[in-house]
Image (cartoon, rainbow, N blue to C red):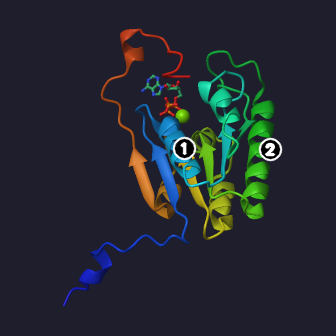
Amino acid sequence: MPDESANKPRPADERRGLILVNTGDGKGKTTAALGTALRAVGYGQKVLVIQFIKGTWHYGELDAVARIPEITLVRAGKGFYKIIDDKFTEAEHREAAAAGLAFARESIAKNEHSLVILDEINVAVSLGLLDLADVIGLLDLKPPHMSLILTGRNAHPDVIARADTVTEMREIKHAFKQGILAKRGIDF
Ligand code: ATP
Ligand code: MG
């Protein structure tokens, strides 16, 4: 007899946090993570957002979260890496990513948040700014009740293997391809 109990829905274990990955080339990875943050805040949960890569551009969420005391947002990046307006050296990008990783390690170990969002961390790994082993090490550190969301294109298969929920945003259309530049309140 096949064991059907394995596929039966189980009641959510309120004590077990999840690992989620938002990846793919379509729009919505970071904003979906921020939507989840909003949902968690509705239950009075504390949320930490650590942004890798990003760091020089302004995003609306920076000011929005300042109005939500349950959410802390920390920027650990130097902006786009080797494209667009990158004025930083590779070493500076690496240092910023390493500082972000160290901060993530410390914060996860302190266990003061229900949800920690590691924004663009998948990109930092795929660009070689962070070691995959270090990111897997963060997942190993996760206290049982904490949930983690890792965002960014090109999520590594080993990260995907460790996650409970993985969503791939697939681009069907993007305004940018019609020559419409990034829009305030929608894209940043
Ligand atoms: P968002 O922050 O809007 O949720 P994202 O996190 O899925 O987007 P990233 O790859 O992190 O996407 O992209 C960062 C920026 O590029 C955002 O301003 C986003 O709106 C924009 N963007 C996302 N997907 C695309 C795309 N397929 N083509 C062009 N620009 C995009
Ligand atoms: Mg993003």
Question: Which residue is at the front of the view, 26 or 129?
Answer: 26
Q: Is residue 151 visible?
A: no
Q: Are marks 1 and 2 in contact (CB under 8 Å)?
A: no
Q: Position of residue 116 (x, y in %)?
A: 63, 52
Question: Which residue is at the front of the view, 132 or 41?
Answer: 41
Looking at the rendered structure, the secondary structure element under dot 2 is helix
Looking at the picture, which amino acid does disc 2 mark? Answer: Ala
Looking at the picture, which amino acid does disc 1 mark? Answer: Leu
Q: Position of residue 145 (x, y in %)?
A: 60, 68
Question: For disc 1, does the CB lie below 8 Å from ligand 1?
Answer: no
On screen, residue 181 above or below 115: above
**Quarter-wise, where is residue 11 in the image?**
bottom left
Q: How many marks?
A: 2
In the picture of the structure, the residue carrying the numbered disc 1 is 38
Which residue is outermost to the top? 179
Of the residues under marks 1 and 2, which one precedes in the sequence?
1
Question: Which residue is at the front of the view, 45 or 161?
Answer: 45
Q: Position of residue 178 (x, y in %)?
A: 36, 11
Compute the Cα span from label 1 to label 2. 26 Å
In the picture of the structure, the residue carrying the numbered disc 2 is 99
Which residue is outermost to the bottom? 1
